[in-house]
Amino acid sequence: MSILDVAGLTVRSGAGALVREVSFSLEPGERLGLIGESGSGKSLTSLAVTGLLPDALVASGSVLLDGHQVVGARDADLRPLRGPVAQVVFQEPLTALDPLMRVGRQIAEPLRRHLGLRGAELRSAVAAALDEVALSEPRFARAYPHELSGGQRQRVAIAIALAAKPQLLIADEPTTALDVTVQDAVLSLLERLVAERGMALLFISHDLAVVSRMVDRIVVLRDGLVVEEGAVGQVLQSPAEPYTRMLVDSARALDAFLDAKEAGA
């Protein structure tokens, strides 16, 4: 059974549709990318998948998360799925993390809620979660988010997301706010953890170079519609749709410009 099965997903704001009849599925252990320009509906799709859409937006269609219907479900029914089944790493960890809570306590929350850990067992699990994302020094557990660098905060966000051992990790532009060196380190961390745990990955980005590194298959969105889908090599090397070709050509032109600039530096 698919860990995620999206069929005819539509997200509306008033009379307007922001996401229209989006369909795709994700098998256990598979890595899928959602790509498109800003405003294409990528992030709204990820929020709909986990039932986290703002109140002003209404979803219709079907989203089955490990066999559980998300569309129309009560938040109380979805809460147990957020952690053991699916978890999200957002673009900006400084806003995703609680600024008034120490990092160790934030990692402890899902461990306590979903795995029932307490006392010494909980403290050991928090230390192990931080060690897994290369933040093993005790000072990190005692720190507040603003005391960490951007890359360290994103590592904490990853540790929180993985604490309850989800079957599906949704990464929504997880490295956009980071510089190139830190971005590479965080992507390498995600690659390793996804592979080691055998998780499914839904990776959302506008950066084709990053997507081609992280996933096996991609879905291309434009104005809330799926315009192309297929294996990452096939779609990026021989795009069938004009919009996808435009994205690929733009990425190649940017890479050529950056290479030329670096060569002339």
Image (tube, grey):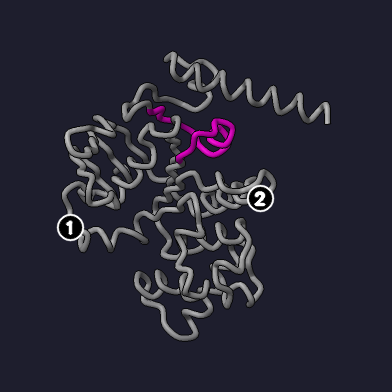
Total numbered badges shown on the rendered structure:
2
Quadrant location of residue 82? bottom left
**Which residue is label 1 attached to?**
74
Residue 83 versus residue 195 in the image, above or below: below
| Camera sees residue 186 | yes
Q: Is residue 177 left or right of residue 118?
A: right
Residue 22 within the magenta-colored segment of the rendering = no
Q: Is residue 69 left or right of residue 103?
A: left
| Point 39% across, 34% down: residue | 39
Q: Position of residue 59 (x, y in %)?
A: 21, 42
| Point 31% across, 27% down: residue | 225
Name which residue type carries label 2.
Answer: Val
| Point 54% across, 34% down: residue | 207
Q: Where does the C terminus fall, quadrant-wise?
A: top right
Element on which disc 2 rests: helix
What's the magenta region?
204-221
Q: Position of residue 42 (x, y in %)?
A: 38, 37
Q: Position of residue 213 (x, y in %)?
A: 58, 36
Question: What is the CA distance from the residue labelled 2 to the residue labelled 1?
Answer: 38 Å
